[in-house]
Image: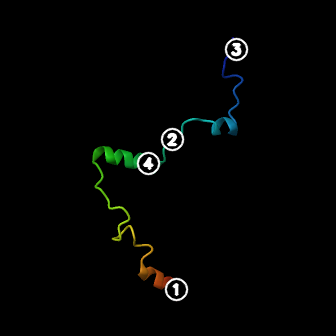
């Protein structure tokens, strides 16, 4: 009796043609956390930290001194 799996080749083309993808570990972690407790709303593009801290004017001045 021939099995359907005998002629199956599990190569890169087979893997890339998969229709589903597993979410990242961070996405799974956040989904689990948000199931336990709903996230608080965050302002869109807030000027307050931490949203705008990286490109703040103070940090830009430090970059120019170098």
Quick one: label 1 or label 4, which is nearer the N terminus? 4
42 over 2 or under it: above or below: below
Query: Would you call the spot at circle 1 few (<14 residues within 10 Å), some (14-19), or many (20 or more)?
Result: few
Quickly name the residue at label 3: 2
Q: Secondary structure at mark 4?
A: helix
Q: Determine the residue positioned at 35% across, 71% down.
A: 47
Coordinates of residue 9 in the picture (x, y in percent): 70, 30
Query: Which quadrant: the C terminus?
Result: bottom right
Quick one: label 1 or label 2, which is nearer the N terminus? 2
Q: Secondary structure at mark 3?
A: loop
Coordinates of residue 8 in the picture (x, y in percent): 69, 26
Relative depth, front residue between 14 and 10? 14
Query: Would you call the spot at circle 2 few (<14 residues within 10 Å), some (14-19), or many (20 or more)?
Result: few
Gap between marks 4 and 3 measured at Cα? 41 Å
Gap between marks 3 and 1 measured at Cα? 71 Å
Quick one: label 2 or label 4, which is nearer the N terminus? 2
Quickly name the residue at label 2: 22
Coordinates of residue 11 in the picture (x, y in percent): 70, 36
Gap between marks 2 and 4 measured at Cα? 10 Å
- Which numbered marker is on residue 64? 1
Quickly name the residue at label 4: 27
């Amino acid at each position: 009796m021939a099995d359907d799996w005998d002629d199956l080749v599990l190569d890169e083309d087979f893997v890339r043609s998969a229709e589903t993808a597993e979410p990242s570990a961070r996405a799974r972690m956040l989904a689990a956390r948000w199931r336990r407790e709903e996230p608080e709303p965050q302002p869109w593009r807030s000027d307050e930290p931490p949203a705008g801290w990286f490109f703040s004017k103070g940090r830009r001045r430090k970059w120019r001194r170098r």
